[in-house]
């Protein structure tokens, strides 16, 4: 239950009495003698109620109400009035004030109005939160494409972790989309407006690693002309994505560990520490703890990086996502080239579903671009070894069901007619493939 209250009144005796009443009733109270001071200290999306006198020097209560209404029309404002101000207060309620209390008022009268206002505020904020979550979920679905159970679980994990101030380790094969997931963790969290800095640890020569990460002062080493801000310092307030973290030299691992522990760094050749606020997202293909046991990675750093872990399934383990991803990449390539990608034939679709995609999403995107260019069938070799005919049929069936559900916005009767299936059979197949009609409504 919300319990935050701001009281604005130029009379010290009123402020003192109201604070005492509300504090004894369990409310968190802030007091301001002037309206402009209230506005200067009012946080965005204030989770509470404003109580304000009408007649005050400088900005009065009605002007304060107008300013508050402009920023947040749903913020409850209770006005305190003298006898002669009642008509004015009634007019203010028509303009958006929640309630008014005529002085002198009893504690019971004030508490009753305040509790009703806080209940309303709680409902408003909860409704906003649900709308924001739905919007984030929709945006994430457009960014991390796929309807497989594994991909849906990944999106839920990303939304949960995006808002948390913890380091994340992403495990996945080459081309499985680790950087895209890292970008989502940044873009859907509170650091979205700050820098996102991506580094591939395997692509940086060991001799340049320290200067690249930590920067350097002028003359720190031969050829160091002028001061240079390192990637970690540049990302202050934001996120650093370290891909192929297992390739980081051991000496730099120790320095990165210190940055994570102390949130401070030193440029190469400097003696002064610089405070930084960073979230580290690392990505790796091998198990970092196994690398540590082999002496190739610091175990203490592995634990610091792996506060939370996300595992990305290879494309061969979520084949039902292949047609949707292929169509997306082909359409994007076609738009870039100013042409319409040709449709896939049934044989080509079967070929896509049968291929093992060792290069994962990156390989699939390349095949889709070639298809959009009109270079014939996707340039892949079918490798169904280890994948039975039944498994391939199941993947194809799941894709057909998903396409029909998406086409008809989850309307079961229309899907039954399109696929010529009785309701019971359709329900059984949807349940077997983990499909829920609500996921397709409005899509």
Image: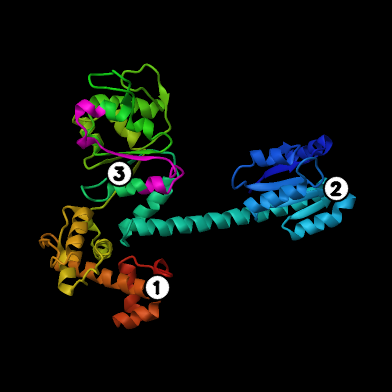
Give the left or right position of residue 38, taking residue 11 as reference.
Answer: left
Q: Under tag 1, what secondary structure?
A: loop
Q: Position of residue 43 (x, y in %)?
A: 61, 42
Q: Position of residue 116 (x, y in %)?
A: 72, 54
The reply to whether the magenta stretch includes residue 208 is yes
Q: Which residue is mark 1?
A: 409
Q: Nearer the viewer, residue 295 or 77?
A: 77
Residue lying at 48% horizontally and 55% vertically, measured from the top left: 133
Q: How is the image coloured?
A: rainbow
Question: Which residue is situated farthest in the right direction here?
Answer: 83
**In the rendered image, the vertical position of residue 110 relative to residue 421, given as above or below:** above
Cα gap from disc 3 to disc 2, whole angstroms: 59 Å
Near mark 3 (Cα within 10 A), the count class, few <14, some 14-19 or many ≥20, is: many
**Residue 29, visible in the rendered structure:** no
Q: What range is drawn magenta here?
A: 184-209
Give the left or right position of residue 11, taking residue 419 as reference.
Answer: right
Q: Are marks 1 and 3 in contact (CB under 8 Å)?
A: no
Q: Which residue is mark 2?
A: 105
Q: Earlier in the sequence, mark 3 or mark 2?
A: 2
Give the left or right position of residue 44, taking residue 436 as reference.
Answer: right
Q: Earlier in the sequence, mark 1 or mark 3?
A: 3
**In the rendered image, the vertical position of residue 230 relative to residue 73, given as above or below:** above
Q: Earlier in the sequence, mark 2 or mark 1?
A: 2
Cα gap from disc 2 to disc 1, whole angstroms: 56 Å
């Amino acid at each position: 239950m919300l319990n935050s209250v701001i009281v604005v009144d130029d009379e010290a005796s009123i402020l003192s009495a109201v604070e005492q009443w509300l504090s004894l009733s369990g409310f968190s109270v802030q007091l301001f003698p002037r309206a402009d001071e209230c506005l200067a200290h009012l946080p965005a999306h204030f989770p509470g109620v404003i109580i304000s006198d009408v007649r005050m020097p400088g900005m009065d209560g009605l002007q304060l109400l107008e300013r508050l209404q402009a920023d947040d029309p749903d913020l409850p404002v209770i006005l305190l009035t003298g006898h002669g101000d009642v008509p004015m207060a009634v007019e203010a309620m028509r303009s958006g004030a929640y309630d008014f209390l005529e002085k002198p008022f009893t504690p019971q009268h004030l508490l009753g109005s305040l509790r009703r206002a806080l209940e309303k505020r709680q409902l408003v904020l909860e409704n906003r939160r649900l709308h924001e979550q739905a919007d984030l979920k929709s945006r994430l679905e457009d960014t991390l494409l796929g309807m497989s159970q594994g991909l849906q679980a990944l999106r839920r994990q990303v939304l949960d972790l995006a808002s948390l101030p913890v380091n994340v380790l992403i495990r996945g094969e080459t081309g499985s989309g680790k950087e895209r997931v890292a970008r989502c963790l940044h873009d859907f969290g509170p650091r979205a407006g700050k820098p996102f800095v991506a580094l591939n640890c395997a692509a940086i020569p060991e001799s340049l690693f320290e200067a690249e990460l930590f920067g350097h002062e002028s003359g720190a080493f031969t050829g160091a002309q002028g001061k240079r801000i390192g990637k970690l310092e540049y990302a202050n307030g934001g996120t650093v994505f370290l891909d192929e973290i297992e390739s980081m030299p051991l000496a730099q691992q120790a320095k990165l560990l210190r940055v994570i522990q102390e949130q401070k760094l030193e440029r190469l050749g400097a003696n002064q520490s610089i405070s930084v606020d960073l979230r580290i997202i690392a990505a790796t293909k091998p198990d970092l703890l196994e690398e540590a046991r082999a002496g190739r990675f610091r175990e203490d750093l592995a634990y610091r990086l792996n506060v939370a872990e996300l595992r990305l399934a290879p494309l061969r383990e979520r084949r039902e996502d292949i047609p949707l991803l292929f169509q997306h990449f082909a359409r994007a390539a076609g738009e870039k080239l100013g042409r319409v990608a040709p449709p896939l034939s049934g044989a080509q679709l079967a070929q896509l579903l049968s291929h093992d995609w060792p290069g994962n999403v990156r390989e699939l995107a390349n095949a889709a671009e070639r298809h959009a260019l009109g270079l014939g069938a996707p340039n892949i070799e079918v490798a169904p070894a280890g994948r039975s005919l039944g498994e391939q049929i199941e993947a194809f069936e799941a894709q057909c069901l998903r396409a029909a559900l998406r086409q008809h916005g989850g309307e079961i009767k229309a899907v039954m007619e399109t696929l010529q299936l009785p309701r019971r059979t359709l329900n059984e197949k949807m349940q077997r493939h983990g499909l829920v009609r609500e996921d397709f409504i409005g899509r």
